[in-house]
Amino acid sequence: MSCVHYKFSSKLNYDTVTFDGLHISLCDLKKQIMGREKLKAADCDLQITNAQTKEEYTDDNALIPKNSSVIVRRIPIGGVKSTSKTYVISRTEPVMGTSKAVCKNTISHFFYTLLLP
């Protein structure tokens, strides 16, 4: 029996998929992982990346050699959608200077209200 070790990017430990032969196709590997993890093909797709070389497998007919380690990410069926909105944040003052001023004003206001009868 041959095997491929896989782990989701959010997990620490690897799980193992076993198969016969010297390699497994990307399509078969995805099917086995989805079955083991109880994922539905209609809900998401899996992005598979070689853990050592960081090569992403994109062709479903690609062959993954036995004893390989891969990183798995769940992605939406249509792929990752880019947003059309762009947010620009500009700051004219340093963050540290602003927060110190707010703290000083808050503390002085606190003591001022404390001293008033």
Image (cartoon, rainbow, N blue to C red):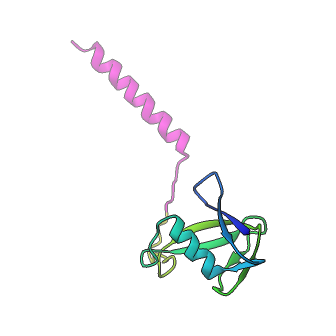
- Residue extent of the magenta highlight: 89-117
Residue 16: where, in percent of width, then height?
A: 66, 62
Specify whether residue 60 is painted magenta. Answer: no
Specify whether residue 99 is painted magenta. Answer: yes
Q: Nearer the viewer, residue 47 or 36?
A: 36
To which quarter of the image does residue 116 belong? top left
Q: What residue lies at 55% left-to-right and 76% top-to-bottom?
A: 31
Q: Nearer the viewer, residue 90 or 78?
A: 78
| Image: 32 above or below 96 | below
| Image: 91 above or below 55 | above
To which quarter of the image does residue 6 belong? bottom right
Residue 84: where, in percent of width, then height?
A: 45, 78
Q: Nearer the viewer, residue 110 or 31?
A: 31
| Image: 42 above or below 2 | below
Question: In which quadrant will I find the N terminus?
Answer: bottom right
Q: What residue lies at 70% left-to-right and 67% top-to-bottom?
A: 4
Residue 65: where, in percent of width, then height?
A: 77, 75
Q: What residue lies at 57% left-to-right and 67% top-to-bottom?
A: 73
Q: What residue lies at 38% left-to-right and 23% top-to-bottom?
A: 108
